[in-house]
Image (spheres, grey):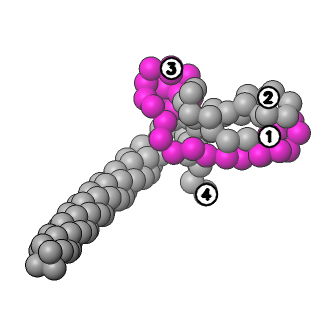
Amino acid sequence: MTRYNSYRNNINQITESSTASRAADKVNDVNRGLNDIKGETLKLQIMVQAMLEIMVEKGISPDLINEKIDKIVEDPKTFEPVIRGSKPCPVCGRTVVDNGSIPLSGTCLYCGTTVRFPPHFESPAQ
């Protein structure tokens, strides 16, 4: 019976070790994936910033860009928002969070005001 218990304990240890190893491998895979996504996001941010600066340098008004952003944001089929922003309500001052159901907008829980969260570009200092 002692031999059986020893054998059983060894199998349990091997199983636990194997499970822990697989879990660690999965965590490493997820971390590598997140680093890839962070790198791609940074690359896209740099490219968008460069395009914006070139457009403004070539005489395209930031107001025109902002109007286009607003038009795209108003179409809920355009994209699914991932980043949830927050800012103070312009009416009551309480914090409003991007609700995610309507792209880049939220509704104040206290006064019902709809608050927009579109990314607007600033005019360069002249």
Residue 103 in sight here: yes
Q: Secondary structure at mark 4?
A: loop
Mark 3 → mark 2, Cα distance in angstroms = 19 Å
Q: Secondary structure at mark 3?
A: loop
Q: Nearer the viewer, residue 86 or 42?
A: 86
Mark 4 → mark 2, Cα distance in angstroms = 32 Å
The circle drawn on residue 38 is: none
Sequence order check: which comes first, mark 1 or mark 3?
3
Segment tinted magenta in the rendering:
68-95
Identify the image quadrant of the C terminus. bottom right
- Could you tell me which residue is drawn at 35 percent across and 53 percent down? 41
- Could you tell me which residue is drawn at 39 percent across and 48 percent down? 48
Which residue was labeled with disc 3? Answer: 75
Sequence order check: which comes first, mark 3 or mark 2?
3
Q: Quadrant of residue 107?
A: top right
Type of amino acid at the residue the image marks with label 2: Thr
Sequence order check: which comes first, mark 4 or mark 3?
3
Q: Quadrant of residue 11?
A: bottom left
- The answer to whether residue 74 is magenta is yes
- Could you tell me which residue is drawn at 50 percent across and 20 percent down? 75
Sequence order check: which comes first, mark 1 or mark 4?
1
Type of amino acid at the residue the image marks with label 4: Ala
* Residue 93 coordinates in the image, percent (x, y): 85, 44
Left or right: 4 as drawn, with respect to 66: left
Sequence order check: which comes first, mark 4 or mark 2?
2
Can you tell which of label 4 and label 2 is closer to the viewer?
A: 2
The circle drawn on residue 89 is: 1
- Could you tell me which residue is drawn at 61 percent across and 57 percent down? 125
Type of amino acid at the residue the image marks with label 1: Cys
